Image (cartoon, grey):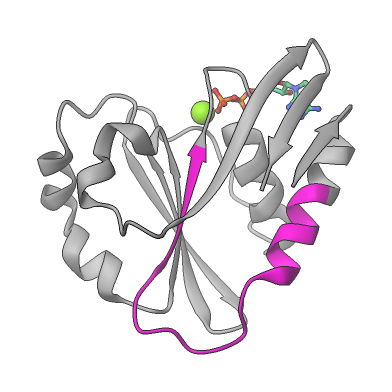
Amino acid sequence: MKTISKSLSDTQKIAEDFIKKISNEAQDSALVIGLYGDLGSGKTTFTQAIAKLFNINEDVTSPTFVIEKIYPINYKNFEKLIHIDAYRLDSAKELFTLDWERTLSDSKNIIFIEWPERVLEVLPKNHTKIFFKFLSENEREIEI
Ligand SMILES: Nc1ncnc2c1ncn2[C@@H]1O[C@H](COP(=O)(O)OP(=O)(O)O)[C@@H](O)[C@H]1O
Ligand SMILES: [Mg+2]
């Protein structure tokens, strides 16, 4: 479904709706959410909105330079929020230096990944996808 966000609080609300709908049921591996969209389309902002809902107080900046950030959470069956920015990764293999297999296999992980198209071959094929589009200065289309 496509929604138009006209403000940061709209984006906050969309993030809230999204997170409420994620499954309550135990899964057999991590929940992976690919955040697709150009630079400035709102991928990091959306992740920050999710972090706010989890009461993560730490600054959730784009992990462009560190690639991956991990935050402890306590929501449904999840215990860790993992935020990855694959923008600077040259190949999917680089994710394995971050213990990717273990991260993926742990059903207590919820993983938000910016620029998933760069590492598609190591993501579960059926991962959840959210598409972001820049419309104008304060407007973003968010397709979930
Ligand atoms: N409606 C909106 N929803 C999300 N971000 C918005 C909106 N309007 C303006 N912005 C701004 O757009 C920018 C989006 O940047 P960011 O989330 O870092 O994008 P990306 O991670 O996709 O590169 C932020 O500066 C944010 O404040
Ligand atoms: Mg970003």
Task: Give percent across and percent down for residue 64.
Answer: 38, 28
Q: Is residue 28 left or right of residue 37?
A: left
Q: Is residue 87 left or right of residue 78?
A: left
Q: Quadrant of ligand 1?
A: top right
Q: Which residue is drawn at 76% across and 25% down?
A: 140
Say if residue 42 shows up in the picture.
Answer: no
Q: Residue at x 81, y 39 (%)?
A: 3
As for residue 20 lying within the magenta part, the answer is yes
Residue 16, above or below 58? below
Q: Which residue is drawn at 69% across and 17% down?
A: 134
Residue 5, above or below 137? below
Task: Give percent across and percent down for residue 136.
Answer: 79, 10
Which residue is nearer to you in this view: 132 or 50?
Answer: 132
State the extent of the magenta-drawn residues as a range: 14-35
Task: Give percent across and percent down for residue 7.
Answer: 88, 29
Which residue is nearer to you in this view: 51 or 100?
Answer: 100
